[in-house]
Image: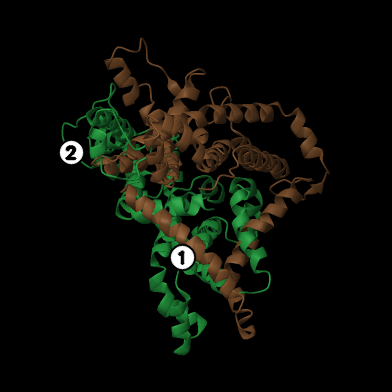
Amino acid sequence: MPEQLKGSLDVGIASFRRNTAARSAAQTTPVGRRYTGLFFALPAIIFTTIFFILPLLMTAFMSLHQWPLLGQSRFIGLENYVNMTRDSQFWNSLWFTTRYTLLVTPAIFILAFVLALLVNLPLRLIGTFRTIYFLPAVIGLGTSSLLWVWLLNDRVGPINGLLNQLGLMERPVIWLADTNAVMPAIIVSIVWKTAGFTMILLLAGMQAIPTELYEVAKVDGANYWQRMRFIMLPLMRRTFALALVLSVIGSYLAFDQFYIMTAGGPQNQTISVVYWIYKNSFTNFNLGYGAALSIILLLILVILSAVQLYILRDDTTY
Amino acid sequence: MATTAQPRSNSAPVAIRWQPVLIYIVCIVLAILFLFPIVWTGINSVKPPAEASASPPTFLPSRIEFENYAKLNNYGKGVWTYVSNSLVTALITVVGSVVLSTLAGYGFARFNFPMKNVSFLLILATLMIPFQSILIPLFLILTQLRLQNTLFGLSLVYITFQLPFGVFIMRNSFASVPREIEEAALLDGCSALSMLYRVMFALVRPGIITVGIYAFLNSWNEFLAALIFMTKEANFTLPILLTSVRSGYYGAIDWGALQAGLMVSIIPCVLIFLLLQRYYVGGLTGGALKG
């Protein structure tokens, strides 16, 4: 199976090279077919314009308005943004989401890296294990959150049942309603759901490193850990950067797990930023304020990904 | 040493000195941890209802029955309404994403036209904007188009979310087809559209399957947009219905029914992944790493 993965990567790289060649060939397209390509691309461009670019511009526009769901909207300048500074739940949500991201990202990464190392070993049946670890990544986050509501239930859930059997628990923990237990519980559920996804990304990065490099190092007497430390890790910077950006963005946009597993509780402690946007827009119907929050979220994410890509930028060629 | 006997493969720092037995044990323990939530839910879903919500929980069923699945019909308009809602939405999304991505991928890979690079970047750049931040105006746009609360409207939004990935994959697929094939077809008097239909389609099939799988799974699993756009119970997709079952919208939580519902939601995803794994993983690594 790893061969297959590598194969698909090779095909990808080859197609990229040919692609560059095709681009120069495309320059010679006859004038009569000047608009043929546009004709093909037009439906996709129209969709993107109506259902993405337009709403994006509208978000910015709406954020400058008092905008109820029904009735007249009113231009209020930056008032929504000013109100945000006094909105304590917004700051709580921002801090909570940041804390969640800082905790869940390393958890996912450490497990995913170990999994990738394991499934990269040349052993029989290792492809089966890779499939198993990846399996939770294909089910929906909403579905997996509901699954964990049951797993973590204090009365009927197997996790409390097992901990009880093993004598590890004095009294049942109500995981999702306990201020101290709720964060670890949700993190475990998310790590279970997403570690396999990150594993595949890291695995592809590992397999893109030419084997010769390891062999040369081996001849020079480097052991397994030295080869990992001095060859694999530095050459995987780009992969790490990509996986990190995807993971941080995903965590910052978390909604399903909090909406489904805790409904923001206990005591409004697990209201993520997207959840707060949802509440303002679709529970309080204050669409203008929701739009302003969306713009701030968008800026935070763009800055975060730019910073991460810059820190982990890679000039290495091999 | 055993290491020299290892097959020469692309495995990372090459030599493993640990005993393979130890590695297998670690792998198996991890596999159990990864599988038990799904397996246990699956087993619970075919227990008698009382056993499925037993406290403390049991593992093996005393007998197998499908009462929990039958009970799913008591919620709202019955589970099949919501399964078919999800299925219809997913199918429209698959067809729309595949058609639009294929056309655009062909256009971007094979032709030059005014604003080509700008429009390609425009489509790809939407990847960097989280869709969560544009849902409020999307809700208003769908309402304007009288598509709010319709499966078709939801599908249109899902198709748009699939486009950056789909167009990227399809452009690369077309770019990797040798130009000679097209030139031969052109000499035979093929028009651009019929060439796409008759010649190219077969050659880019792997890309089409990849785009289709992702469109299906993302549509089938999506939660937030469906929650916002679908306010009438009759139009709920499966994940939204299941959340209502959980939140006690229909009375106390019926654990057996919830587990049956979860299996209805999980099984299609697992089947598609197991059958088409090659295309799925290829799309992930090929699309993401060079994206």
Q: Note whether B201 is above or below A86 in the view shown.
A: below
N-term-proximal mark, 2 vs 1: 2
Direction from residue A144 to residue B107 in the image, left or right: right
Q: Please give the label number shown on residue B64.
A: 2
Residue type at mark 2? Ile
Image quadrant assignment for residue A214: top left
Direction from residue B119 to residue B181 in the image, left or right: left
Is residue B252 among what the camera can see? no
Q: Please give the label number shown on residue A32.
A: none
Front residue of A49/B225: it is A49
Residue A273 percent location from the top left of the image: 62, 35
Residue type at mark 1? Ser
Report the residue marked by disc 1.
Answer: B173
Give the residue drawn at x 60%, y 64%: A47
Give the residue drawn at x 19%, y 30%: B60
Element marked by disc 2: loop
Direction from residue B27 to residue B124 in the image, left or right: right
Residue B177 percent location from the top left of the image: 45, 71
Q: Colour of chain B?
A: green
Q: Residues within 10 Å of mark 1 (few under 14, many from 20)?
A: many
Direction from residue B80 to residue A85 in the image, left or right: right
Of all residues, the one furthest to the left in this rendering is B63
Q: Note whether B290 is above or below B118 in the view shown.
A: above
Q: Colour of chain A?
A: brown
Front residue of B48/A171: it is A171
Residue B29 percent location from the top left of the image: 28, 29
